[in-house]
Image (cartoon, rainbow, N blue to C red):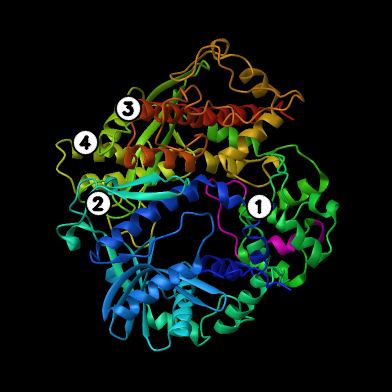
Amino acid sequence: MTNPKKRYLTKSRYKLGLECPNKLYYTNKKDYANAKMNDPFLQALASGGFQVEELARMHYPDGILIEDKKSDETYDYQDKVDQTIELLENNEDVVIFEAAFLYQNLFIRVDILEKKGDQINLIEVKAKSFDSTNAEFEFVGKRGGLDSNWKFYLFDVSFQKYVINKAFPQYTVKPFLMLADKSQTTTINGLNQLFRITKNNDNRTGVERKIDQLKNIEAESVLGIADISNEVRGIESGRHRIIEDYDFEDGIQIFAKAYQEDRYLGHDLNFNVCKHCEFKTDKQNKDEKKSGFEECFKMQLNWKEKDFKQPTAFEISRLHFSKLNKFNELGILKLEDIEDVELLPKKESAPVMNGMSTSERQLIQKHKALEKDFTPVVLKDELKAEINSWTFPLNFIDFEASTMALPFYKGQSPYEKVVFQFSVHTYQENGTIEHADEYINVQPGEFPNFEFVRQLKKALEKNKGTVFQFSPYENSTLNQIKAQLENSDEADKEKLINFIQTLTTPPTSKSYEGELWNPTRGMVDLCEVVKAYYYNPHTKGSNSIKAILPAVFESSKLIKEKYTRPIKEINMTSKNFEDDYIWLKQNDDNTIEDPYKSLKPPFEDWDPEFERKSEIEEINNGGAALTAYGLTQYTDMGNEERKEIKNALLRYCELDTLAMVIVYEHLVEVSQDDFI
């Protein structure tokens, strides 16, 4: 009888088990859906992580990388362990990148390992940011436990330390995190671009350095290191836990055994985790893969196919995690089993615009879902009064920005926004819609923020009409540029700052200690208008414009009839689409295709004989836009390839502001007395 194939519990699989032990059964199985595999936002974060790791290695110029020696498709665990052992045994002091350790079926690779005699410094590199001036309190919560934002990172390092201690008990292991330090700025212009994202022959993502070393690592790098020995000791002792049922070592052994046996653990469901489970299928996109999420509910709650079609608490908008915890304890999830009183808060916060409160919207959502009633709920008088307070022409704006761990420009800290694009649609009182202005800068090495504001100022000062955003994103972005201007030597910085203050409200963070001001042309948040006065059951509680837009198409014949006609027929101008372009395309069953999915992808007409450096296939969401901009900055691409990405970004951003126009038109429609 042959031994079963060894299945190794790595640090990423250990982390997955901490999120939910049942996930270990579904991971790395091609027949199960996994939403995280194709998430463009996560891919953008991963690219930033590769860059940070490469910069971290430059802090240790004599480090030795454990590389893959074999070219076949089999991942040779033992080969990497053997290389590591040889370096440890033959060197009193050594720095190793990707050092490999194996104990039973536990396998880890350490980002940076620094051996000094009998002591090993275990350094885990993450693209996450921290403030080194406050490192003593960075990882600890208000009640003395681990901060929830850091728990999984700290357990990750603890797991690595455990494996090293078991494999080599003769060494003393000290744990560290190396992170993007918000208190540091770089003296290098173009630090990010020095680490180019590449693809190798196996289509794996990697980084190509444009320099061999940094001249002054302390001034040029933005990475800091934190000693997390106290936090790790708390984890090892059992004082800090993520899963209360397991102490630290028992949890590792349980996960390792279950993963080796490819066995479903049957851990009790945690609704707060289940709500965000990545092992769900997308029924709308006809996902043919299996759903681990559904299998869990079938096995543990004995659900049948019909149960998944019934509305649940997962759909309730802005439901506090404590409520889901309570429903978890009571063993109820379906809305039909949840009493109205259970959705009421202990203390209701005041609605922003004196409209519906959060709990009122939640109760409306519940009853609409149970009654299968898709008629929108509208506070007509309040909505009409709000609309009548706006001044024509109306201006709808949308920004696209990038926040990367490694700064693009000299004097910047990690994750400072680089705002590279805006779009403006204007709506005249006679109904004329004009794509009035746009700005984009995707040239590598060019800092766009200040010119961005100059162009936005020029665009919005053409009229004195009301300006709209959708969410506070534009407000917070402009306030960040204001802070950058204050620290700049721009000749027109006072004019630009004054312009920003006409539009924005000051930051509301408790840590903000700067000046306060009252905007004379304060932006109206269209999302807050929707939340206050309008609820559409087709959104299932989501207030994202990507959810509201298809809900509008379902509810409004007026909107559907208007936008299923070509641009030239609907009193509209466009900068990026032909006059015969139709925004809403009808499917054979008369449903409307998502206009974002109808966007022409970049490189659709690209000659296949011309090799391109970027792998992006579509730009139809914010994560893809962020990824696309990053590619134009840290990928060695030609002008034609950059132009393709630029044009796709322009199309995407124009659709974003048109979507706001459509929402506005629908709000006007539903505020009328004759709307049913």
Q: Which numbered disc covers residue 412?
A: 2
The amino acid at mark 3 is: Asn
Residue at (65, 72) in percent of width and height:
260
The amino acid at mark 1 is: Lys
Q: Secondary structure at mark 1?
A: loop
Nearest to N terminus: mark 2 or mark 1: 1
Label 2 vs label 1, nearer the camera: 1
Task: Give how far across and how far down residue 611 sits, in percent.
Answer: 41, 30
Badge 1 local density, few (<14 within 10 Å), some, or many (20+)? few
User: Which residue is under mark 3?
Assistant: 639
Residue at (37, 34) in percent of width and height:
421
Q: Would residue 102 appear left or right of 276 to someone viewing this image? A: left
Badge 4 local density, few (<14 within 10 Å), some, or many (20+)? few
User: Which residue is under mark 1?
Assistant: 30
Where does the N terminus fall, quadrant-wise? Answer: bottom right
The amino acid at mark 2 is: Gln
Label 1 vs label 3, nearer the camera: 1
Is the magenta region chiefly helix, strand or loop? loop
Q: Determine contact: label 2, label 4, CB under 8 Å.
A: no
Confirm whether residue 364 shows in the render.
yes
Q: CA distance from mark 4 to mark 1?
A: 56 Å
* Region rendered in magenta: 336-356
Q: Which numbered disc covers residue 495?
A: 4
Nearest to N terminus: mark 3 or mark 2: 2
Q: Secondary structure at mark 2?
A: loop
Q: CA distance from mark 2 to mark 4?
A: 22 Å
Nearest to N terminus: mark 2 or mark 4: 2
The amino acid at mark 4 is: Lys
Task: Give how far across and how far down residue 122 sits, in percent.
Answer: 36, 75
Q: Secondary structure at mark 4?
A: helix
Q: Determine contact: label 3, label 2, CB under 8 Å.
A: no
Q: Nearer the viewer, residue 499 or 199?
A: 199
